[in-house]
Image (spheres, rainbow, N blue to C red):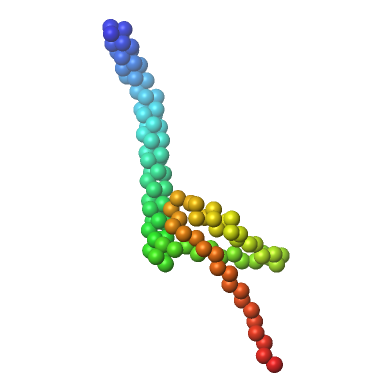
């Protein structure tokens, strides 16, 4: 226990002798910890806001639309994709619907 007390006295003595360096070290630690706390708070706030927006729009329903690519190829959502969506933790249900748009010309 006596040796521990000597180490503590030596540490305090070194801090007093190098006040400038000690101040800058503490300032760096404070800025770093504050930055991490700020980033975590902003991230949690954004997540909460996004969850609130998703639940307020259309009763919490999300619609996924597939459009054709520039090369004319139409991507397809398969039954396996639908089943994978159903397995997600916060998804209560998923269904597939196909809509097709056409132009009708009359003579």
Q: How many marks?
A: 0
In which image quadrant can residue 103 be found?
Answer: bottom right
Instruction: Please state which of residues 42 and 50 is positioned toward the viewer in this rendering.
Output: 50
Q: Residue furthest right?
A: 71
**In the rendering, at what x and y percent does residue 8 appear?**
31, 14
**Quadrant position of residue 83:** bottom right
Task: Identify the image quadrant of the N terminus.
Answer: top left
Does residue 7 appear left or right of residue 93 in this picture? left
**Depicted 92 relative to depicted 22: above or below:** below
Quarter of the figure with the C terminus: bottom right
- Image vertical order of residue 40 relative to residue 79, above or below: above
Q: Position of residue 57 (x, y in %)?
A: 41, 65
**17 displayed left or right of 101:** left
Q: Residue 24: horizontal and vertical position, in percent?
A: 39, 29
Question: Residue furthest toward the bottom?
Answer: 107
Residue depicted at 41% across the width and 44% down the height: 39
Residue sitting at the far top: 2
Q: Residue at x 40, y 56 (%)?
A: 51
Asked whether residue 33 is in view, the answer is yes
Q: Nearer the viewer, residue 51 or 22?
A: 51
The answer to whether residue 26 is above or below residue 102 is above
The x and y percentages for residue 49 are 39, 56
Q: Can residue 13 be seen here?
A: no
Residue at 59% in and 59% down: 79
């Amino acid at each position: 226990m006596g040796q521990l007390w000597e180490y503590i006295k030596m540490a305090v003595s070194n801090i007093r002798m190098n006040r400038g360096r000690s101040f800058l070290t503490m300032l760096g630690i404070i800025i770093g910890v504050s930055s991490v706390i700020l980033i975590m708070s902003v991230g949690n706030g954004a997540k909460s806001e996004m969850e609130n927006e998703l639940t307020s729009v259309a009763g919490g329903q999300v619609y996924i639309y597939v459009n054709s690519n520039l090369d004319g190829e139409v991507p397809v959502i398969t039954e396996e994709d639908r089943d994978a969506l159903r397995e997600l933790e916060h998804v209560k249900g998923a269904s597939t619907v196909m809509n097709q748009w056409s132009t009708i010309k009359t003579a």
